[in-house]
Amino acid sequence: MERCTCSKAGSAERTAGATLTQPNDSALVTIDLYPYVGETPPRAFRSWLTPNPLFYVRNHFSEPEIDLTSWSLSVEGSVSTPLSLTSGQIEAMPKHTVPVTLECAGNNRTDLEPAVPGNKFQCGAISTAIWAGVSLRNVLEQAGVGPGATEVLFEGADAGEPEPGYGQTPYLRSLPLEVAMHPDTLLTYEMNGEALAPEHGHPLRLIVPGWYAMSSVKWLRAIRVIDYSFEGFFQTDRYVINSGLRKPDPVTRMLVKSHINEPEHGQALSLGEHLVTGVAWSGSGRISNVEVSDDGGVTWRPARLDGPDHRYAWRQWCFSWTPSKPGHYTLMARAQDELGTWQPLEPDWNALGYAINGVMAVCVSVTG
Ligand SMILES: Nc1nc2c(c(=O)[nH]1)N[C@H]1C(S)=C(S)[C@@H](COP(=O)(O)O)O[C@H]1N2
Ligand SMILES: [Mo]
């Protein structure tokens, strides 16, 4: 019995009663076909780097066809020297390499009750890769950012109608100027040492470390420096958290969160020592603590942080667990980041289902 078990804290009955499916570990778990959306199979989480073919895919429109012979990146708007850069020119600039975990803002949307519209993501809309390219800052400095600039707008080569009646639009997202100017904000052409695959944004993709992945625009074709607040569909209709009275909050940095890799939900274990393992991440900094509970969140004990420790990538952790007697157990993990923020037991429900970071529960039975 293996299943992606991203259930909310305390809802052991719900996960126990859910249909168990057998994900194929050598392929993405398809969520939608047109446009393609696929999750990383949970077992791939056991590898710190996600193998490229298992890196989740989330497209809003069909993948654009790009003719590399005529492709160039234009840098325009409020700049002193507009640029048009070929792949060769970009690759000749100093190379910057950063491991980054990307999580879709809608990951774990199926945890929400009542249910919300949108891709029915369980826990697989997250993956980690080593990205290589050039600092966006380097390109912006070459172009010379104008004095009144406040944001930088990124345009993908993909386009379509995001919702009936809206009209055609490319995929467009903006970033505050200071985030765009951060040296680790990258224009990437490589992923885990290989050329970017078409589905991940070949020939050039923005990577915004720490932010939910809607910001990391794929198939870049234009970068525009602007002196106003961009309000396109993917900026203000989507990727906002409507909290009722106030102006909607934009979705930005990934909230602190953890995932249990093993044991798997529904697994039968024998009495004795078992390793509970998983990953934890936060867009606001390194993970400082992970704790595990075997009694449904009543008591917690510290897990050991493990594996590579990089600012923008998930951290592996493990916990040695020796259940004292046979029975049914609800295992949970919770993470804390270096700002001191703990992952909450329950996520904040919001109408579009973004930034869902409640604790995951895994139910196991132990026999003597
Ligand atoms: N041009 C473009 N960029 C895009 C998207 C898109 O549809 N078009 N989807 C965004 C969203 S919502 C996510 S979660 C990530 C997914 O990146 P991946 O498919 O490489 O995992 O790309 C982001 N960048
Ligand atoms: Mo996303």
Image (tube, rainbow, N blue to C red):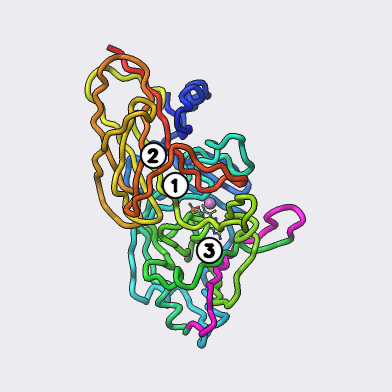
Question: How many C-alpha atoms fall within 10 Å of the one at disc 2: few (<14), some, or many (≥20)?
Answer: many
Can residue 71 be seen at all in this image of the molecule? no
Q: Say which label, 2 or 1, has the lower sequence index.
A: 1
Q: Nearer the viewer, mark 2 or mark 1?
A: 2
Residue 6 location, x and y as percent?
Answer: 46, 34
**Amino acid type of the residue tagged 2 in the rendering:** His
Secondary structure of the residue carrying numbered label 1? strand
Task: Work out whether residue 334 can be spotted.
Answer: yes
Which residue is denoted by mark 2 in the rendering?
259
Residue at the front extreme, as displayed = 245
State the separation of the CA atoms marked 1 and 3: 19 Å
> Is residue 156 magenta-colored?
yes
Are dots 2 and 1 in contact, CB under 8 Å? Answer: yes
Local packing at callout 1 (Cα closer than 10 Å; few below 14, some 14-19, many 20+) is: many
Q: In percent of the image, x 64 and y 53: which residue is there? A: 245
Name the secondary structure under disc 3. loop
Q: Rate crowding at label 3 as few (under 14), some (14 to 19) or many (20 or more) other CA atoms within 10 Å.
A: many
Q: Which mark is residue 126?
A: 1
Q: Is residue 296 above or below residue 337?
A: above
Coordinates of residue 275 in the picture (x, y in percent) = 26, 30
Q: How far, Cα to Cα, is label 2 from label 1?
A: 10 Å
Q: Nearer the viewer, mark 1 or mark 3?
A: 1
On the image, which quarter does residue 93 sit in? bottom left
Residue annotated with mark 3: 219
- Amino acid on which the number 3 mark rests in the picture: Trp
Is residue 54 inside the magenta stretch? no
Task: Give the magenta range.
Answer: 145-166
> Of tags 2 and 3, which is closer to the observer?
2
N-term-proximal mark, 2 vs 3: 3
